[in-house]
Image (cartoon, rainbow, N blue to C red):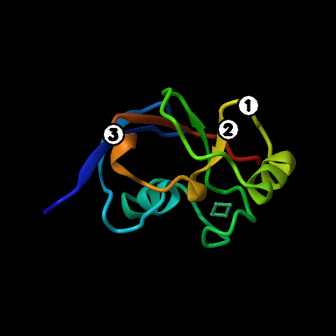
Amino acid sequence: MEHNILVTIVDRNGESKEYEAPTDMGLNVMELCKSYELPVEGTCGGMALCASCHVYVMSDHELTEPTDDELAMLDQAFFVKPNSRLGCQIKLKDSLDGLKLVLAPVAS
Ligand code: FES
């Protein structure tokens, strides 16, 4: 049986789009973005070590608490807001249906 949720992602041009996201493959938000060729590098492969997957969470879904590693990385990232998270640390699951995210800007 297929398990899909819908995740809305606003890219860095302000364009909002709804993406189908499988919840039975152990994917995280960074991997989802990459699979749809959104400009998310995921340089560290999801180890909470690069912040290239930085997103803002715009919906009030209950997410797992950030780990110390994630908080330490966000501490060094640019453009951090109270709703900042690392996409690679958000695992796609059924309860996140309707999740809305905005890709954080990248420092130039
Ligand atoms: Fe590197 Fe998320 S992919 S911190």
If you read the primary sequence from the N terminus, does the residue marked by circle 3 or circle 2 appear first? 2
* Amino acid carrying mark 2 in the image: Ser
Badge 2 is on which residue? 84
Crowding near pointer 1: few (<14 within 10 Å), some, many (20+)? few
Q: Which residue is at the front of the view, 64 or 48?
A: 64
* Amino acid carrying mark 1 in the image: Lys
The dot on residue 97 is: 3
Mark 3 Cβ and ligand 1 under 8 Å apart: no
Q: Label 1's element?
A: loop
Crowding near pointer 2: few (<14 within 10 Å), some, many (20+)? many
Answer above or below: position of 65 versus 99.
Answer: below
Report the label total.
3
The answer to whether the residues at label 1 and label 2 have Cβ atoms under 8 Å apart is: yes
Please provide percent x and percent y for residue 80: 76, 37
If you read the primary sequence from the N terminus, does the residue marked by circle 1 or circle 3 appear first? 1
Q: Nearer the viewer, mark 1 or mark 3?
A: 3
Q: Quadrant of residue 43?
A: bottom right
The dot on residue 51 is: none
In the picture, measured across the screen, residue 78 lies left or right of residue 35, that is: right
Q: Quadrant of residue 82?
A: top right
Q: Label 2's element?
A: strand
**What's the CA distance linking mark 1 and mark 3?**
23 Å
Q: Residue at x 28, y 46 (%)?
A: 5
Ligand 1 in which quarter: bottom right
Answer above or below: position of 21 versus 8.
Answer: below
Badge 1 is on which residue? 81
